[in-house]
Image: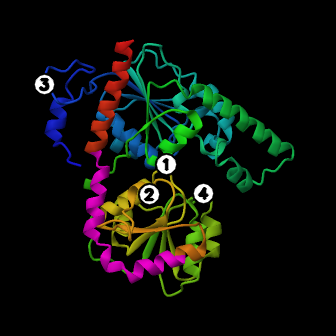
Amino acid sequence: MHHMRRDELAAITRLRGPQRRAFGQTRPALADRSARIAVVHDWCPNFRGGERVLARICKLFPNAEVFTLFDFLPNDIKEQYFHDVAFHSSAANQLPMVQKYYRSLFFLCPFLIEQFDVTGYDAVISSSAAFARGVLTRPDQPHLCYVHSPIRYAWDEQFSYLAQGRLGFGPKGLLFRYMLHNLRTWDTRTAHGPDLMLANSSYVRSRIQRIYGRQAQVVFPPVALDELEFIACKDDYYVTASFLAPYKRTDLVIRAFNDMPSRRLVVVGEGQQSQSLRGMASSNVSFTGYLPRQEYVRTVASAKAMVFAGCEDFGIALAEAQACGTPLIVFGRGGARDIVQPFGEAEHPTGILFGSQSVESLKEAIHVFEQNQPAIKSQACRSNADRFSEDRFDLAILKALAMAQAAHVRR
């Protein structure tokens, strides 16, 4: 798609939306960027994909303030990405050593999110993968919800999470299942609070429709293309990069490369599986741990391809790899289907999709990639990433908030 120049975008966003357009005017109404916006985000444990979306929304609305259950962002990140943005956290944020166990407080989070008073703001934008959408708003207050995902562990991935936690049907397992049941009840009750829902991928849009019975427009997360180095001449290694959690399936990638000792794999990231993954890896698999942004970009940009075996709601790391000119070899379910232009289907392919989360399926995908590597060009990957630009995201948010505002005007 064609993107507006930054100066043109700035000029038209001075409109105070929702305004009635003059006869013959073709531009849609856009929200007022100077409005006081309450941006409600589940929690900020670190600066990952969801927090990048949050930062972009705050940059788009200079008078925005953030409401989040838990705020553990370091000061240097706040200075760089949230300069002069006020943060409001829940009372639970002050609990001793809460950073170690905040996820276990999920059963309290619906109550905690309802304690934020956002009724004095012009509009509310919730950035929600779980609880933010349930914030209490005025009946006449526009509420736009950007959905990263319905609550994964309360809905279709409940059994996977329970299995990972070894929670069967003993007393503890039954208690967790009952709390998740209550969470589903609350989640369903609050699903119709926002005036408008946006989904970060086609996959999430389908989950919203199935779980909540609501329609949502797909707006891809913003990728900071200007920050990402394009490298056409690649090194001779593969890379996988993520938070090292079970659902990311980094274990599957490592097991596949254990079976291919002539190929090098670099694993970027830290997480709860760091120690166990290091213990299972062969000598051709190396770990970098957490990397500073510039070093991370260079590592991804220099790789022969990025390999990922999890099912992501979107997968901003995958989109960033494309912007670096790096092909993808990824599991073909979830947000990856919105990102990859698949070999064998697209005129200008940017990667390989494999069909099952198995070592053999991944190994076969790597073989197909190596046999057809000249057909997957770095420039095609970079061009593909233009669909995820920040300007495109900004314009979509301004239009969507104006639509939410217009809904209240019509009432």
- Picture quarter with the C terminus: top left
Sequence-first disc among 2 and 3: 3
In the rendered image, which residue does mark 2 sit on?
337
The 10 Å Cα crowd at callout 3, few under 14, some 14 to 19, many 20 or more, is few
In the rendered image, which residue does mark 3 sit on?
24
Sequence-first disc among 4 and 1: 1
Give the residue type at disc 1.
Tyr
- Find residue 203 and name its label: 1
Give the residue type at disc 4.
Tyr
Where residue 44 sits: x, y (%)? 50, 41
Nearest the eye: 213 or 14: 213
Residue at 52 percent of width and 32 percent of height? 132
Name the residue at the bottom extreme. 262
Q: Which residues are magenta?
A: 363-390
- Find residue 247 and name its label: 4
Sequence-first disc among 4 and 3: 3
Would you say residue 47 sits in the magenta stretch? no
Structural distance between the alpha carbons of marks 2 and 3? 38 Å
Secondary structure under tag 3 reads loop
Position above or below: 119 against 181 = above
Q: Nearer the viewer, mark 4 or mark 1?
A: 1
Question: Do callouts 1 and 3 mark residues in contact (Cβ within 8 Å)?
Answer: no
Where residue 164 sits: x, y (%)? 71, 56
